[in-house]
Image: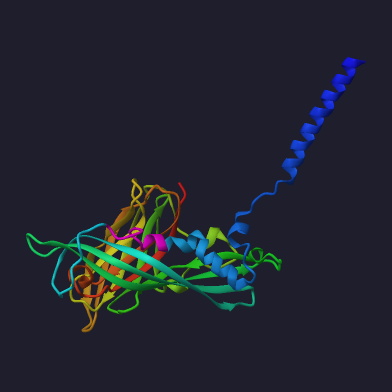
Amino acid sequence: MEKFGKLLSGVLVLGLTLVGCTKDEIITPAIDPNDQLYGSAQNDQQFFELFAQNDEFLRNDDIAMNDGPSPAPFDDEIVGTMTEIHPIRWARFIRNIQRSVQLDSVTADSLAYVTVTKTFNGVLVILARYDSTTIDTVRKDFTSQSKKRIIFKKIANDRVIWRNWRPVAVSLIDGGTTSSEAINIAQLELVYFNAGVRDSLVINDPLSTFFRIRRHRDINGMDVPDFTGGQEARMFATVVSASPDTDHVVLRYGFTPDGRRRRIRLHLISESFDGTNYTRVYTRAFNMHFHRGVFAAAVDAMTHGTLFDDAEPVSTSFWGVPYMVTN
């Protein structure tokens, strides 16, 4: 009888222990990452603003246009004198970003069109050669602005605001320096191959060209280009410039194998002049990086004087195409 009592006590203790563990597991709530990011939104506008700050489709242009968190430790800067220089290396550093979010319209089929405007303040740092013996650093402050549009679809009327809207499409990035209209991108063409079949994406109006986010079929638009690591592609950029000197046009995309931000120069293949402006076409073939995720392939066009004159202000135009690397 004594043994039976001890056995019964052991069973009860074990049972209570198991019940306690089961109870703890049941009442532990799952943490929804959307609640962490957007749970503080009290209305639609606040949700749109939080989304613009956090979603990967909205942050990739910040990364693409920034060569680093702070200027490199070059030599002391020099005062501009309108002197021709020969850049050895250069980098653009963004110091701060200001965002504004505007609800443009809501259609009858519950689609909300939102424009996100970003203002970048930064510095262009150029390590330049003046002559055979003189190398100095030129720093040029700049302000640039970019726009991107998002389409949200209304899917519910929940008291938790973020549950009411689903992002379904995003436009390209359209940006450039705010102080100059000396250079503008007029067209991009991205050529790539899927399973041996040539595909081409031609863009003339970046803010009216929409890509479906995560392949939502309830919205008109194209799927975000999806690449595999190492896949070959080619970018063509048509640039209109007031400068008689050849512009400097680069493609910014992804990362190098050692984690640095990738930037390659496009080559000039044609030029025409209408008496006022030059229209130039640049191109470059490239292989996709192996970093997985959502990125922006940004064509960054700069006037010749931006890099080759120590006092001419920064004049740039950039468009960014969203893309994914999944394999």
Up/down of 20 relative to 72, above or below: above
- Residue nearest the viewer, comparing 19 with 235: 19
Q: Quadrant of residue 270?
A: bottom left
Q: Residue furthest bottom?
A: 275
Colour mode of the rendering = rainbow
In the rendered image, the residue lying farthest to the right is: 1
The magenta stretch is: 62-72
Q: Report if residue 169 is visible in the image.
A: no
Could you say which quadrant of the image residue 79 lies in? bottom left
Residue 205 placement, left or right of 113: left
Residue 148 x/y as whole percent: 46, 70
Identified at 26% across, 62% down, the residue is: 266
Of 145 and 200, nearer the camera is 145
On whether residue 245 falls in the magenta region, the answer is no
- Who's the residue at 36% across and 65% down the image? 95
| Relative horizontal placement of residue 60, taking residue 133 as reference (left or right) | right
Secondary structure mainly formed by the magenta segment:
loop
**Residue 267, image x, y percentages:** 23, 62
- Whether 122 is drawn above or below 263: the answer is below
* Quarter containing the N terminus: top right
Instruction: Indicate the position of residue 40 as horizontal and vertical percent values.
Output: 62, 64
Which is nearer the eye, 266 or 86?
86
**Quarter-wise, where is residue 261 in the image?**
bottom left
Residue that sits furthest to the left in the current view: 132
Residue 117 in sight here: yes
Task: Judge whether 108 appears above or below 171 on screen.
Answer: below
Where residue 36 appears, x then y in whole percent?
60, 57
What residue sits 53% from the left and 61% below the top? 213
The count of marks equals 0
